Amino acid sequence: MGQRGVFERIFMETNGFPDLEYAMIDGTIVQAQQKSSGAKVGTQDQAVGRSRGGLTTKVVAMVDALGNLVDFVLLPGQAHDMKGVRPLIEGVSFESLLADKALDADWFVAELDGRGASAVIPPKAN
């Protein structure tokens, strides 16, 4: 994230008390500008990936039952949504998790079952 943690502090102050009766996780790809990967300051990971579509970043986010942002993870654009899920759910209690079929993995559903949460994920078409 930001070098000085400004966005992290703003996010933590505005996060409030999420309604975690159920949570929703999804990811989307954001087109990155050409100069976004050429930062000369700092060595932190910029979460910029290269694919046929050019430079991209993937945002995987978790929102509460009211649609308020709970947390998010930035990944390189070519990364699978599943790579960002574990940090999102660590330390968070919810009754149900709604997600798209990208998160339909046996180990993930088993982990949710072990936490006492139900998974509302459509099955993959294969």
Image (cartoon, helix red, strand yellow):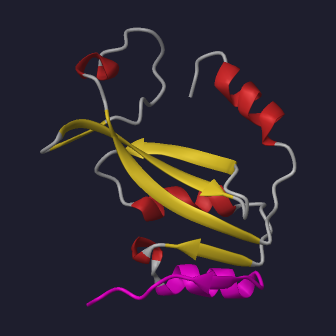
Tell me, yes or no, if residue 90 can be seen here: yes
Residue farthest right in this picture: 17
Where does the image place residue 30, in percent across and percent down from the top left? 35, 39
Examine the image and state in which quarter residue 120 appears. Answer: bottom right
Task: Tell me which segment is drawn in magenta.
Answer: 106-126
The answer to whether residue 55 is magenta is no
Q: Is residue 119 left or right of residue 42?
A: right
- The residue lying furthest to the left in this view is 52
At horizontal 68% and vertical 19% (from top left) the residue drawn is: 6
Instruction: Say whether residue 34 is left or right of residue 88.
Output: left
Q: Is residue 95 left or right of residue 80?
A: right
Q: Is residue 5 in sight in this rendering?
A: no
Check the picture and name the quadrant holding the N terminus: top right
User: Residue 95 location in percent, x, y?
Assistant: 77, 78
Quadrant in the picture for the C terminus: bottom left
In depth, the one of 77 and 107 nearer the eye is 77
Q: Residue furthest front?
A: 66
Image spot of residue 73 (x, y percent): 54, 46
Examine the rendered structure and indicate whether residue 5 appears above or below residue 122: above
* Residue drawn at 75 percent across, 26 percent down: 9
